[in-house]
Amino acid sequence: MTSFVVEPVTRVLSGRVEVPGDKSIGHRSLLFGGLCAGEVEVSGLSGGQDNTRTRVAMEAMGVRVVDRGPGRVTISGVGVDGLRAARGAIDCGNSGTSMRLLCGLLGGQRFDSRLFGDESLTRRPMRRVTEPLRSMGAVIDGVSRADRPGEVYPPLVVRGARGPLAGIDVELAVASAQVKSAILLAGLYADGPVRVREPGPSRDHTERMLAELGAPIATAGEGSVTLDPVGWDRRLSAAAIQVPGDPSSAAFLVAAALVAGASGFALARVCLNPTRTGFLDAVDEMGAGVRRALAATGPGEPIGDLVIDAPAGGAALRATSVGGSLVVRAIDELPVLSVLAARADGTTTIADAGELRVKESDRLATTCAMLRAFGVEVEELADGLVIHGQPGGRLRAAHIDSHGDHRIAMSATIAALVADGPSRIEDTDNVATSYPGFARALNQLAGGQVVSEVG
């Protein structure tokens, strides 16, 4: 098990770097690339463990994936109906996205499959995805627990379908790109239209990519999408996919620049999909002044650079309130947003974030514990946090347990940059699930060794 030892930063951050490819788009490029009719060239893959789980799963079902260089692969698609049964169980590791999206894909196959994961993933509830899939006719069995009657946990067994799945018109109680995407994947094997309605917009990478590949999909305003396979030739057209930089990974470097100061600082080729810019919108409200320079598009996605100039000692941030649809668009970035709130003038409230309790850790509890260790005054709510900012000065050096959660580990690293001495963050192997090279990128921007990895 590795740890980070983090020294306080002594200069403003400077330089231009690229963050790893977006995990969400990476998962979908591997899944849909495998279902295409022909070869698909994918570039910009992150190389993180989560995307690797999806790649290995598709390879186990007969899809050939060949490495062509860092972040580049060629996928030999087998077509929508060309997958075959894996010889053994499919290991999703720590990737909830892999497991949930594979549930949708496997629900319409004619063979049985078993999905399992590590200890953390085994604790994550799956009913919200298995329930709508079951209503389409998919047969999915999981593990029940006495303390959560009616809930479903991994390992999951997905039974082969005896015929086409049924169309569905479902309204989700909570906006969720993973659940929506699982239903749309199952919809490729349905005999009628599949419509998903959400209380607000969630990530729309699945809709964008399916449209690019020629699937019969249409959106109807925010929070509603329909896939209608009736009369479709069941063919996804092979096309090159360029995966842009991950805005969730970029958020940590943006936060570093805002707490430490920045000059000539830029993050290149970041995905600027509006469903993913909740963190940037929140820091705009805090007065951060992060400039977005739109440059190109890729798999239907807007792509651009993020540019920051902030004085030594960090940007002058003001407190804000985060809730509702903004939480949906910033759900993965809320722990590091909390670090910025700890440096802001005033009291920041985060609400409607109960979803964080069922991530790799209970992220409300672990974020609260992390901030308190750095000397920040914070209150934990049932669905959020109240953070009393401490602008200026230094945080208290801390010893942090990440609880196996990569976003807690990286958020603590950012806070440690402005501590009054060296800090140690335990259990940082998990950072490789989303951001391989995170410590290296910070050291590059800081112009020296501020983050050291120790065994």
Image (cartoon, rainbow, N blue to C red):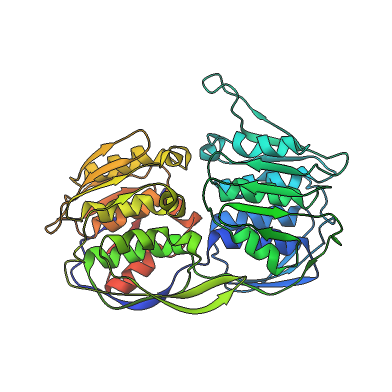
Q: Is residue 23 left or right of residue 409?
A: right
Mark yes or no: residue 88 visible: no
Residue at 17% from the left image edge and 55% from the top image edge: 345
**What residue is rendered at 64% in x and 51% in y?**
181
Residue 419 shows up from this direction: yes
Relative depth, front residue between 213 and 401: 213
Classify residue 234 as left or right of residue 365.
right
Can you give x and y, in whole percent of width and height, for residue 279 in the image? 38, 59
Classify residue 81 as left or right of residue 404.
Answer: right
Residue 145's quadrant in the figure? top right
- Quadrant in which residue 301 is drawn: bottom right
Q: Position of residue 364 (x, y in %)?
A: 36, 40
Q: Residue furthest front?
A: 221
Nearer to us in this view, 60 or 376: 376
| Residue sitting at x 63%, y 64% | 208
Please provide percent x and percent y for residue 27: 62, 58
Q: Nearer the viewer, residue 297 or 409?
A: 297
Q: Nearer the viewer, residue 43 or 319?
A: 319
Q: Position of residue 322 (x, y in %)?
A: 34, 50
Extreme residue toward the left, this view: 393
**Numbered disc total:** 0
Height in image: 104 above or below 282? above
In the rendered structure, the answer to whether residue 115 lies left or right of residue 148 reads right
Residue under the image location 17 percent in, 51 percent down = 346
Residue at the far top in the pictured view: 146
Q: Is residue 32 above or below residue 103?
A: below
